[in-house]
Image (cartoon, rainbow, N blue to C red):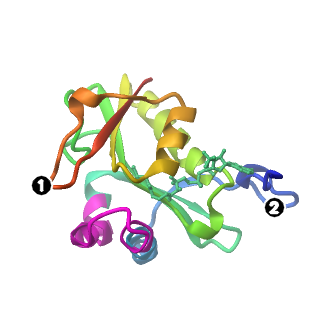
Amino acid sequence: MPRLPAVSSAAGAPSPSVETARPEDFSRIAELTVDVYVGGGLTNPGYAVELADVASRAERAELLVVRDGDGRVVGSVALVLDGDFGEVTESDDEAAFRMLVVDPVRQGRGTGELLVAACLERARAAGKRRMVLSTGPTMTAAHRLYERMGFTRLPERDWSPVPGVDLQVYVLEL
Ligand SMILES: CC(C)(COP(=O)(O)OP(=O)(O)OC[C@H]1O[C@@H](n2cnc3c(N)ncnc32)[C@H](O)[C@@H]1OP(=O)(O)O)[C@@H](O)C(=O)NCCC(=O)NCCS
C-alpha cells in the first residue's frame, strides 16, 4: 500500500507542530476523545465523563495538540510530568502520558508518533528518566506505535482501575 504523505512533510503545507492546547480547544478535544474512545468501543462508556473533562486535565497535565492547516485540532495527548494524574508513575523520575488520540480521518500520517515524540522530548528536558503509560487491550494501533518507538511491556505494573477493566503498562527508558 502506498504511504500517505506524512503530516510533517505534506507538499507545500507548513509542517504541523505540537503546541500546548488553549482553553478554546477544550471542547474540541473532549468531543474528539470521547468519540474515538467511547464511540470506537475502546473504553467503557462510564469513562466518558473523565475523558470529556479537559479543563481538569489541563490543570494536572500538559495538554498538547496538533492542528490541521485550518487550525482545527486533529490530535491530542496529556503529558504528566508531576503529580498523580499519570496513575502509573511510581517515582519523581517517571513521566506518563494519557488520552492520546488522533482524529480517525487523520490517522496513519504520523500524527500519533509526533505527539508521542513531543512527550518524550519534553520529559527528557524535564530531567525524567522513564516514560510509563497504561493502555487497554483493544488499543492495538497504539500498541504498534509504542513498540515501534521502543516502548516495552511492564507487566508487573498492569492494573485494573475498576473490576473488568484490565490495563497494560508500557515503559520507555529516556
Ligand atoms: C494510536 C493513535 C493515536 C495513533 O495515531 P496515528 O496518527 O494514526 O499514528 P501514526 O500515523 O503515527 O501511526 C499509525 C500507522 O500509520 C503508519 N504511518 C505513519 N505515517 C505514515 C505515512 N506517511 N503513510 C502511511 N502510513 C503511515 C504507521 O506506520 C502506523 O502503521 P501501523 O498502524 O501499521 O502500525 C490512533 O490510532 C488513535 O487515536 N487510536 C485510538 C485511541 C487510542 O488507542 N489511544 C491510545 C491510548 S493508550
Residue 123 falls in image quadrant: top left
Q: Residue at x 54, y 42 (%)?
A: 145
Image-based side of 131 in relation to 164, left or right: right
Image-based side of 35 in relation to 136, left or right: right
**Neighbourhood count class around disc 1 (C-alpha, 10 Å): few under 14, some 14–19, many 20 upward:** few
Secondary structure that dominates the magenta span = helix
In terms of depth relative to the viewer, which is nearer, 10 or 125? 10
Assess whether residue 47 is covered by the magenta stretch: yes
Image x and y of residue 49, in percent: 24, 73
- Comes first in the chain, label 2 or label 1: 2
Image-based side of 83 in relation to 139, left or right: left
Indicate whether 8 appears above or below 103. above
In terms of depth relative to the viewer, which is nearer, 95 or 145? 145
Under circle 2, the secondary element is loop
Image-based side of 164 in relation to 15, left or right: left
Q: Residue furthest right?
A: 12
Q: Amino acid at mark 2?
A: Ala
Image x and y of residue 122, in percent: 46, 37
Reading the image, the residue beneath label 2 is 13
Task: Mark 2 and mark 1 in contact? Answer it, CB < 8 Å.
Answer: no
Assess whether residue 66 is covered by the magenta stretch: no
Residue 133 falls in image quadrant: top left
Q: Quadrant of the C terminus?
A: top left
Residue segment shown in magenta: 35-57
Q: Residue at x 27, y 46 (%)?
A: 167
**Neighbourhood count class around disc 2 (C-alpha, 10 Å): few under 14, some 14–19, many 20 upward:** few
Under circle 1, the secondary element is loop
Q: Amino acid at mark 1?
A: Pro
Reading the image, the residue beneath label 1 is 163
Image x and y of residue 116, in percent: 51, 43
- Residue 119 in sight here: yes
